[in-house]
Image (cartoon, rainbow, N blue to C red):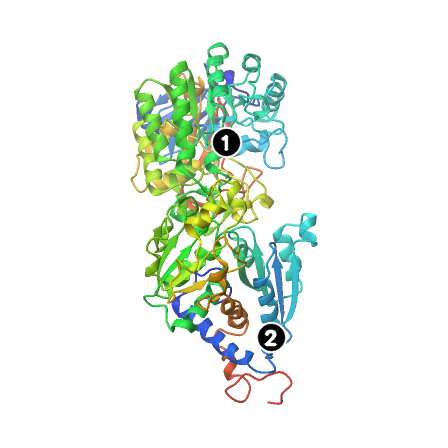
Amino acid sequence: MKHLLSIEQLSRAEIESILDRAESFAEVGRRDIKKVPTLRGRTVVSLFYESSTRTSSSFDLAAKRLSADFVSVKAAGSSVEKGESLKDTVATLSAYDPAAIVIRHPYAGAAQMVAGWTEAAVVNAGDGKHEHPSQALLDVYTLRRRLGSLDGVRIWIVGDVLHSRVARSNLIAFAKMGAEVTVCGPPTLIPRGIEELGCDVSYSLDGIEEAEVVYALRMQKERMSESFVPSLREYAACFQIDTRRLNPRQLLMHPGPVNRGVELSGEAIDSPQSLIAEQVAAGLVVRMAILYELLAGGGASTPAAEGEGSQPTPIGTSA
Amino acid sequence: MSLREQLDVRPAEDAHLVLRRATVLDPVAGIDSVHDVVIRSGEIAALASPGEAETDGAEVIETEGLHAFPAFFDPHVHLRTPGHEHKEDVETGTRAAAAGGYCGILAMANTEPPVSTAADVSALREQARAGASVPVGFLATVTKDMRGAELTEMVELCEAGAVGFSDDGLPIIDAGVMRRALQYQHLCGGNIALHEEDPRLSMGGAMHEGPVSAALGIGGIPSVSESTMVARDAALAGYENARIHVQHLSAAESVEIVRAAKAAGVRISAEASPHHLCLTDEEVRSLDPHSAKMNPPLREERDRQALIEGLRDGAIECIATDHAPHQPEEKDVPFEQAAFGVTGLETAFATLHTELVLPGTIDLGLLVERMAGGAEPFDLPRPTLAPGSEANVVLCDLGAEWTVGEDGYESRSANSWCAGRTLTGRVLMTVAAGQVAYRLRSFSLGVAA
């Protein structure tokens, strides 16, 4: 695998291999010294045209845990603000000969275009409303740890599917891993033709009790002004996941950041069935696995097989 | 009545040619046989028996096995002049037209500034007389500066030589303004060409709304954003007994509305573009703005089939390229940010011959008829090979394979939707308004007798 541009491009076996590698990094993360030398001397550049907390910080930390040099470029305050085109920015950054470029961009296909302009491996950290593959991988990782397997698991993705790259990548990833997916939300926020991606569509929460997993999406406030829904109040009345609607055996997920009291009630977020904190933790090890797969993988040894023994070699210890 | 009299072209020497043993096909004139085509003093002087034409000092070209058709007419071209001459100008755009086998084109008015005054029209006509390889007609905008609010001085514009009117690039959103324009047409004349789209339904979308847009997360432009406006304007045209020409049909529903309006006696004509006839929204999966971003967007297979059926039954009388030149920096950006539009003049015939005629979807004769069908809706003479007519002839090698873009383009822009594709069928020579407008460089000329 040269780039990670979409979940669509991955087979189930490729997804599983990334997740297996993430498991071994979780192992490393439980040690005192959490760093491995795998990418020492190599450079990872992150190029973010949109704000991000989780994704950018976890790629940053993932690169550092793998001993790569990490450079972060944000559109705000950079030459992008001076009108430099994406193509020229990528050419500039490529002059540093980075091993990987992690890019987030407000428009679909940006990561794919960047892949055509650079020798570096490209990781799509979100392209418009198209895909967010590392999010989907960490979500599958989180569920796999909890449930063992996604085969036959019923998952409802609830909320603003129309504007959500997470919904698209997750729906594809969950389906590839054998889950049965339903997307649910007001008809104004469900894209026409989405069922051809292999999911069911529901315009109400009726029937959500069948789900083993409820995945809520962020409801953005600007959707009100565009008349997608009449009010946040009515949206919450129809689609908010609260402890009354959630039954105790269901798992709850959300990509963050949450609008408390809109798509999720406060109790639901803080309930024991919420996996939100686990998702964030998974983000780090899965992103380490992604960088490893692209930069050191492709038939290379697993991190666990590196060094002398069966464990990765922490920096500063004599192997 | 001839294109040379009614449009503007750079004057050149009258063609004096004999196309020896050409396969001559002009379905509208009922011609389909092998002839010596004699072109003299800018006219089709005769269709002589093969090998028997008197040469009489003419250049003789051995064209056995080659096809001669009436040259094509494109009622929808963006010459980008004034204001965007870095993309195209009158000279490069008409060279591209000549290379595509066209003997005439109509230039859209959505320039910068838009063509809204008699002075704008006069200046463009002067440029055409100085540098156009093929006759050009200029449309003027329907509303002042295309703002959709006030009508332009349509009488004066017609007197200055505007061939018709269009706000192409933008729809006329206000139905009241549209109605006034149609009423006023009874005074000024001139067909009104319409870009049909309701922006409140398109909502800033970048591709057709359907399963592919759902999968890609790209805002969709629904078919109804076009068809509801076609229905509105067909109703208005019927009510006012006015004439409209619907540009670049893309949706099956729109074809059906045009067909029904024609059956009801409405004076409506319509065009379809090569890219809508050859491609569907599946092309957008590549996320390549060069081959797949245009407005109206590429739609589904059922829409493409409806357009083809429209060509067959005459609901759509002509093929128009909507030739829309752009520079690389407007296309080398993510799909949603890229400019709408692709070039098409140099490839229209070859793409449709390759994609529709060779597989047997439509007859060669139908393609030839529709490629020249864009003149009549604007009261211009249809190009024909009937003896005595102005010589508007395209010579094609239907067996020639070529790769689009390998020798560059005559157009100043390279944003061809079919760049890199190998096509079958190539224009070798174009005679427009009695003048030789184009010869393929590698096309060896016969020996003068």
Quarter the N terminus of chain B occupies: top left
Label 2 vs label 1, nearer the camera: 2
Residue name at image x 41 percent, y 45 percent? B281
Q: Which residue is mark 1?
A: B98
Q: Secondary structure at mark 2?
A: helix
Q: Is residue A240 visible?
A: yes
Q: Position of residue A209 (x, y in %)?
A: 34, 59
Q: Position of residue B369 (x, y in %)?
A: 36, 27
* Location of residue A250 by image quarter: bottom left
Q: Residue furthest top?
A: B187
Assess disc 1: are there few (<14), some (14-19) or many (≥20) residues with their C-alpha within 10 Å of its C-alpha: many
Quick one: B167 or B128, which is closer to the camera?
B167
- Location of residue B265 with respect to B360 vertically, above or below: above
Q: Position of residue B224 (x, y in %)?
A: 40, 34
Quick one: B382 or A276, which is closer to the camera?
A276
Quarter the C terminus of chain B occupies: top left
Q: Label 1 is placed on what type of residue?
A: Ala
Q: Which residue is mark 2?
A: A65
**What chain letter is assigned to the residue under label 2?**
A
Q: CA distance from mark 2 to mark 1?
A: 62 Å
Q: Secondary structure at mark 1?
A: helix
Quick one: B24 or B256, which is closer to the camera?
B256
**What chain letter is assigned to the residue under label 1?**
B
